[in-house]
Amino acid sequence: MRFLRVLFLTMLLAVPAVSGRAHAEPPPPVIPGLPALPDLSGLPPLIDASGSVLPGLQQWIDAVIPAPPVVAAAPPNSPQLEVAGVQPELAALRAAVLPSPVRDPIFDEWPADLDTFTPGQLIEVRDVGATAGALVLMPFDRALLLKFRTTDVYGRPSFATATLVTPLGAWPGPGGRPVLVNNLPINGLGRDCTPGYTMAHGWDSDISVTDYIPPAIQLALLRGYAVLVPDHEGPRMAYAEPVVAGHAILDSIRAVRGLLPDDFGDSGFGLIGYSGGAIATHGAVKVMPDYAPELADVVVGAVVGGVPADYEILSRSMNANLASGVFMGAVLGIARERTEILGRMNNLAQWIATSPVKDLCADVFGAAGLLLLPIDVAANFPDPLNSEFAAQIYRETRMEGIKSPVPLYIYNGEQEWWIPAEGARNLFREQCALGVSAVYRSVLGEHVIAGGLGFPEAILWMDERLRGVPAPNEC
């Protein structure tokens, strides 16, 4: 099944190359009973006089490939679709690119009265202890799936889910039991790609190895800490959108403290995330001052590793190479919240974004990187990654100049080629200049190797913060 999905994705992305053969050949004869093929005689050449193929290719794609027959997946007044000032056609496209339901109301259903809830207020709690073992892999006391109100990128009410796992035995230390907030990479576009879905439904083939390695959940439980695992992409599965992820993480902490104040009202919460989880953790510390200032005294520190903190850097390192499938998936994830991006997609991109691709996890849609396609083939305007439109997205997602209210531990692979250490170093320098207690570690290796080699010291740093040891400052 996974092979078929990869094949399907590859065929979709290869449409321009297949269709290109028709441009050089005479028009085929009209076959009675079948619609006539479009007249290709007026199309621009695939290679223009300047030697740049892409502007001509973009025009050619939209001339050959019609727009998809987009039909809104929910009523126009549905809360998951409302965005002020969006034209009906774009709103319909947004509805069509959202992830498909997984037939579980805790992940699918938007409460009708969501606007009456406050951020972090609980909507529903489910005991998932019988199925959470597929991810926890060791004895634990209980596992609770929490659904709570949060906020989308436009400031409108949304919801998110998170799973709280508590260890066996009473907490022997002072104060409340510490909580490790483990922000897993997720890296998925479908709602069944999340750790919350796995813990609620058990093991399936879409589980990612990064849910298990490194073993942060198990180490935390062995230390007697509780573990909170947010589904930080939210119900729209806004993969790589840091503001939405930051809101969801902070509201998951609010939800735990509201549900079990006797157990966690005095607890310290530590945030940790690598790669996609670092996007979420970085988002959380940057939105905390304005969105959840009361948690500055609750969160003891944050670890961010393999840090995709600056998408302008990634636009140079992940485009038109083996990482381009993941990069394009991230653009689609961000576009689910930042609707203006959808209006810059050409017809080919719209077909792909509304196809079953929209429900895939990264280990499948990442295979599109084998085609080495630049993101220009998905845009409807020239040089999209160097445009003022892109620069605005870079600025908004970088959240530059905002001081983290909690200590930071930052690490990155020195030999990283897809997520260069430049972004992590810039974040470290920025936060030092703002007066944050921070540590930076340059780790041997590229993304995968650095993730393994950098984890031991990172988790030891977090363990000290959860035990109340003051954070070192190496600025």
Image (cartoon, rainbow, N blue to C red):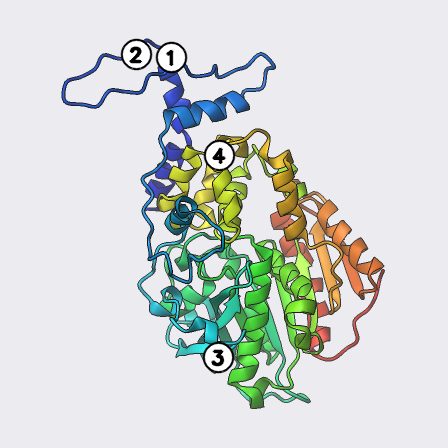
Q: Earlier in the sequence, mark 4 or mark 1?
A: 1
Q: Amino acid at mark 3?
A: Phe
Disc 1 vs disc 2: Cβ atoms closer than 8 Å?
Answer: yes
Q: How many marks?
A: 4
- Depth-wise, is mark 1 or mark 2 nearer the camera? 1
- Residue plotted at (77% across, 50% down): 426
Spatial CA distance of label 4 from label 1 is: 23 Å
Residue 140 - label: 3
Q: Earlier in the sequence, mark 1 or mark 3?
A: 1
Q: x, y percentage for residue 209?
A: 49, 56
Spatial CA distance of label 3 from label 4 is: 46 Å
Determine the secondary structure under disc 1. loop
Residue 27 - label: 2
Other-residue count near label 3 (Cα within 10 Å), few / some / many at <14 / 14–19 / ≥20 = some
Quick check: 405 above or below 213? below
- Answer with left or right where residue 146 lies relative to residue 327: left
- Depth-wise, is mark 2 or mark 3 nearer the camera? 2
Residue 378 - label: 4
Spatial CA distance of label 2 from label 3 is: 67 Å
The residue positioned farthest toward the left in the image shown: 33
Spatial CA distance of label 1 from label 2 is: 8 Å
Residue occupied by mark 1: 41
Quadrant of the frame with the C terminus: bottom right
One can see residue 200 in this view:
yes
Q: Amino acid at mark 1?
A: Ser
- Residue plotted at (42% across, 68% down): 199
Residue 205 - label: none
Q: Earlier in the sequence, mark 2 or mark 4?
A: 2
Q: Earlier in the sequence, mark 3 or mark 4?
A: 3
